[in-house]
Amino acid sequence: MKISAKSRNQVITSEAKQSLLERGLFRRLWLLAMTLTGWFSDTLSGTTKVTMSRKLLICSFLCLWVPFVAVTAVAKVLPEEVARLEANLTPLGAERAGNAAGTIPPWTGGITQPPPGYEPGSHHPDPYPDDTILFTITAANVAEYAAYLSEGQKALLAAYPDTWRMPVYPTRRSASYPDWVYAALKANALTAEVVVEGKGGVVNATITSPFPIPQSGVEVIWNHNLRWRGIYVARSNGSAAVTRLGNYGVILAEQEVGIPYGSPRITPFKEAYPNVMFATKSKIIQPELLSGEGSVIIEPLNQTDDPRKAWIYSKGLRRIVRLPYAAYDFPVPNTENLQTIDEVGLFNGPPDRFTWTLVGKREVYIPYNAYRLHSDSITIGTM
C-alpha cells in the first residue's frame, strides 16, 4: 500500500510546532525500525534488490493442484522423496506436468527474464498481451464450474449475483524463483521441523517455505507464511474499505519491508537475531486527516517466547505507542473493522487457533498474473 530545522530566533507557528513534533516522533519510530532492520544494506550487497508493487488480482485459469489444508508435528522427508522436487514435482512441490485435459500446461521454469518494456519500480508490462477471456463465471452458470471453485468464491457469486463475475484466462505457469531459493527448498525438506507447542513455529529452515512436500496441514500454512518474498521491498500501497453501499475512501501509504529470513547470506543481524522473519514500517501520506501516522512491526519465526511486536505513531496522541499484541482477529486499523490482522496476505501469524487438515490436492481457479488490472492506464470505472 502507498505510506526543517528552525533557528532559535525564528517564530514558529502552532501549526509548524505540531508538524515538527510529529516529524520528530515519527523519526524516532523510523530509527527504531532501522535499528531492527539495519541489515538492509548488508543483505543487498551482492544480491538482487527486489522491488514490488501491490497487485490487484484477476482470475486466470490457473488450476494448480492446491494442497487443502490440519495439526501434527511431522517433519523431514526421506531423500528419495526429496528427489521428486527435480523429477515429477516443481521445486515448490507442485505437479510439474500438465493435466490430462490440457487446461493446465506443464511448468517449464516460469518467467526468468523481464518482459519487453519492463522498468524497475514501474507498473509491470503484461507478458501475455494477446491472451483473451476463455469464459466468464457468473451466478447464472456457477453450477457448471462449482467443482473448480472455493467456498468463498461461490459465496461471493451468491451474495452479488448482478455485479460479481470471474473472467477466466488461459493458464500461464509463470512463477519462478532464483536458483538459490530452489536449493534452499530442497535443503529445508530434509531438515525443517514444525514446533506445535504454544503459538507454534519452525526450526532448521531458512530463506523460503520449509516443507515443499508437506506431511500435515499446519506445514502448508508455514509454507505460506515463510514463502520467499525477496529480501527488501519498497512499495506504495493504496487501500480502501468499501461498504455495501459502494462508499469508500482511499488510504495511500509508503512501506518498506526487510526480510532477513529470505537472505542467503549470514549477516551480523541474522546471526544476532535469528528469530526475526521480517520487519515492516509504513507511513500514511493520504488522506490529510491520517497523513503522518505510521507503524512498525517485527515478525518472529517462533512466537511462543518472542511474540510479534508492533508500534504505532498516532497524530491524536502525538506519541509512539506499543500495541499490546496485534494478531489474530484484531481489526486492521483504518479498515472500518472489515478486515482482521490474520487475513492480511491471505493468512499470517501463529496458526495455533485453528485445526488444519491436509485433505489432498484438486484443481481450482485462482487469481494470478493481474498485469492488466494493475496497469496504470486502467480507471476505477473500467474496473
Image: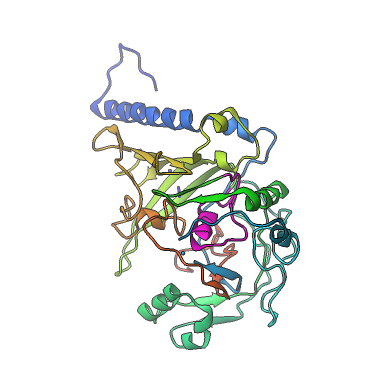
Q: Is residue 272 above or below residue 59?
A: above
Horizontally, residue 175 falls left or right of residue 243, namely: right
Can residue 119 be seen here? The reply is yes
Q: Main secondary structure of the magenta part?
A: loop
Which quarter of the figure has residue 360?
bottom right
Q: Position of residue 321 (x, y in %)?
A: 29, 35
The residue that appears at 38% across and 27% down in the rendered structure is 28
Q: Is residue 291 left or right of residue 43?
A: left
At a point 56% along the width and 38% down the height, the residue shown is: 260
In the rendering, at what x and y percent does residue 160 appear?
37, 78
Question: Where residue 210 sits: x, y (%)?
Answer: 58, 52
Tell me the quarter of the picture where residue 292 sits.
top left
Q: Is residue 353 magenta?
A: no
Residue 345: give x, y in percent of width and height.
46, 56
Residue 364 or residue 202, whichever sits in front: 202
**In-front residue for pair 41/262:** 262
Residue 6 is left or right of residue 100, and the answer is: left
327 or 206, which is in the foreground?
A: 206
The magenta region covers 204-229
